[in-house]
Image (spheres, rainbow, N blue to C red):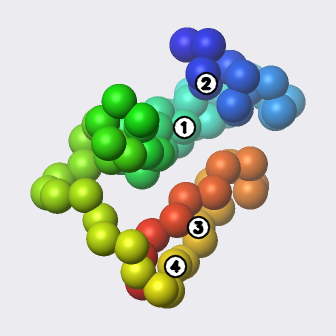
């Protein structure tokens, strides 16, 4: 809970229950599917397959209006 507060909620003005639910849902999706975790050899908890090999071309995607950046191999 501390991570979502520090990395997300401390930077946004939440406008209501529906907005809070949407923001937290998007952050949890990002944290579990895209964000690398050191304890898992830089793999997300719900990642499928082997770790990604480094590539030359990287695509950046923004979430929550650019507050969070996700990077994927092209």
Residue at horizontal 52 percent and vertical 65 percent from the top:
71
In the structure shown, which secondary structural element does the residue marked by tag 4 occupy? strand
Q: What is the x, y in percent for residue 21?
A: 57, 28
* Dot 3 or dot 1, earlier in sequence: 1
Q: Residues within 10 Å of mark 4 (few under 14, many from 20)?
A: few
Quadrant containing the C terminus is: bottom left
Q: Residue under label 2, please give it.
A: 4
Q: Is there a contact, CB below 8 Å, between mark 4 and mark 1? A: no
Q: Residue furthest top?
A: 1
Q: Residue under label 1, please give it.
A: 27
Is residue 2 positioned above or below 13 on the image? above
- Between 2 and 20, the one nearer to me in the picture: 2
Q: What is the x, y in percent for residue 41?
A: 32, 42
In the structure shown, which secondary structural element does the residue marked by tag 3 occupy? strand
Between circles 4 and 1, the one closer to the viewer is 4
Q: Residue under label 3, please give it.
A: 61
Q: Is residue 72 left or right of residue 62?
A: left
In the structure shown, which secondary structural element does the residue marked by tag 2 occupy? helix
Q: Is there a contact, CB below 8 Å, between mark 2 and mark 1? A: yes
Q: Which mark is residue 58?
A: 4
Q: Residues within 10 Å of mark 2 (few under 14, many from 20)?
A: some
Q: Quadrant of residue 44?
A: top left
Q: Residues within 10 Å of mark 3 (few under 14, many from 20)?
A: few
Q: Is residue 64 left or right of residue 25?
A: right
């Amino acid at each position: 809970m501390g991570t979502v507060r520090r990395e997300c909620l401390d930077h946004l003005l939440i406008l209501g229950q529906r907005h809070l639910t949407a923001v937290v849902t998007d952050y949890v999706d990002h944290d579990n599917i895209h964000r690398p975790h050191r304890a898992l050899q830089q793999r997300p908890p719900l990642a499928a397959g082997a770790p990604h090999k480094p590539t030359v071309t990287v695509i950046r995607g923004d979430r929550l209006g650019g507050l969070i950046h996700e990077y994927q191999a092209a």
